[in-house]
Amino acid sequence: MKIIFTLLWVYLWITPINSQDNKVDSNSPGKKLRVGEEIVYLVKYLFFELGEVRLKITDSNIENGDTIYKSIAYIDSYEGVPFVDLHQIYESYFNQNQIPILFKGTVFGESDTSITQYTFNRKIKSVRVYRGKSDLSETWVDSTAYLESDHQDGLSIFYFARMRTGQNRSYNIPCFVNEKSENTIINYSDERYTIKIKAIDYEVDCVKLEGKTDFVSIFGLTGAFEGWFSNDSYAVPILAKMKVIIGNITLELIDWNKNEWIPPKYTALNRK
């Protein structure tokens, strides 16, 4: 159950294949991030509601001419769910192209709290990896990995993917997982889809991405995944389906800053 619930993202960075050019990809035209954004998802396995994932963009600053965003994700199981008492926090600092600078994961256990921290250095193409107890009383990993290209962390990829929706392209993805590089594929589509969820009383205008990975990430993702994002400048994920080691989970949008974003209503006649 913990493997199912802790799944969110793969550590990866996207470079295009079968695309119109060989340039490093940037944000899709018109896409934007909002400081203060908060979106909440219900995590379900079969008919069981396991808990919630809450994501926020809390700040942005200019550093050396680059806009640096701070994002944070809270993962919490519901009280009373059998065999699950899970509370985790992930933080990521990334630039306007969602290339990460710093990632930190905090896992709260029954007796202690552990942290994982990745510090990326683009100049020397390296990432410093630290894992240990949060009070620094024990260090389990303290090493440096050298990479041939930029790599995403587990949270920045969420925003990286959002800012590139609405394309009709496929991507080959180098992934930094468990201190080594792996690969996966993501396919974007510019087709429009209708998605209906409980929190919205109409069909939402969406675009889709789907992909597959052949390895097991640190969050348990292995195999196929797909997601539907609002077909607007904010590209808010509405619904996601993912395969993990022992089955499939669903993440469904249940709450957001309602005074700042209105989900786009699907009105076209040619529905999918």
Image (cartoon, rainbow, N blue to C red):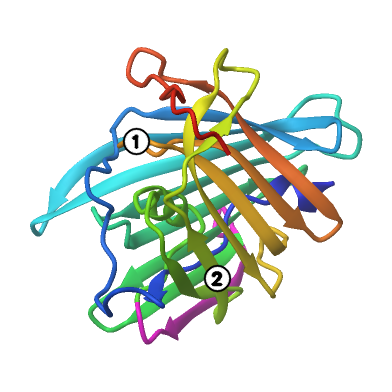
Q: Is residue 221 left or right of residue 121?
A: right
Residue 203: within the magenta?
Answer: no
Q: Position of residue 267 (x, y in %)?
A: 44, 23
SS assignment at label 1: loop
Q: Position of residue 205 (x, y in %)?
A: 46, 31
Q: Is residue 175 above or below residue 225?
A: below
What amino acid does circle 1 point to?
Answer: Tyr
Q: Are marks 2 and 1 in contact (CB under 8 Å)?
A: no
Look at 29% across and 39% down and name the residue there. 33
Q: Tag on residue 187?
A: none
Q: Position of residue 91 (x, y in %)?
A: 45, 48
Q: Which residue is mark 2?
A: 185
* Foreground residue among 247 and 206: 206
Look at 55% across and 23% down and name the residue there. 203
* Foreground residue among 53 and 23: 23
Could you tell me if residue 19 is visible in this image?
Answer: yes
What amino acid does circle 2 point to?
Answer: Ile
* Foreground residue among 69 and 104: 69
SS assignment at label 2: strand
Q: Is residue 9 above or below residue 33?
A: below
Residue 138: within the magenta?
Answer: yes
Look at 41% across and 15% down and name the residue there. 258
How busy is the neighbourhood of tag 2: few (under 14 within 10 Å), some, or many (20 plus)? some
Q: Which quadrant is the C terminus positioned in?
A: top right
* Foreground residue among 32 and 79: 32
Q: Which residues are magenta?
A: 133-149
First in sequence, mark 2 or 1: give its number. 2
Q: Is residue 83 left or right of residue 33?
A: right
Look at 42% across and 51% down and name the residue there. 190
Q: Position of residue 211 (x, y in %)?
A: 59, 63
Q: Tag on residue 234?
A: 1
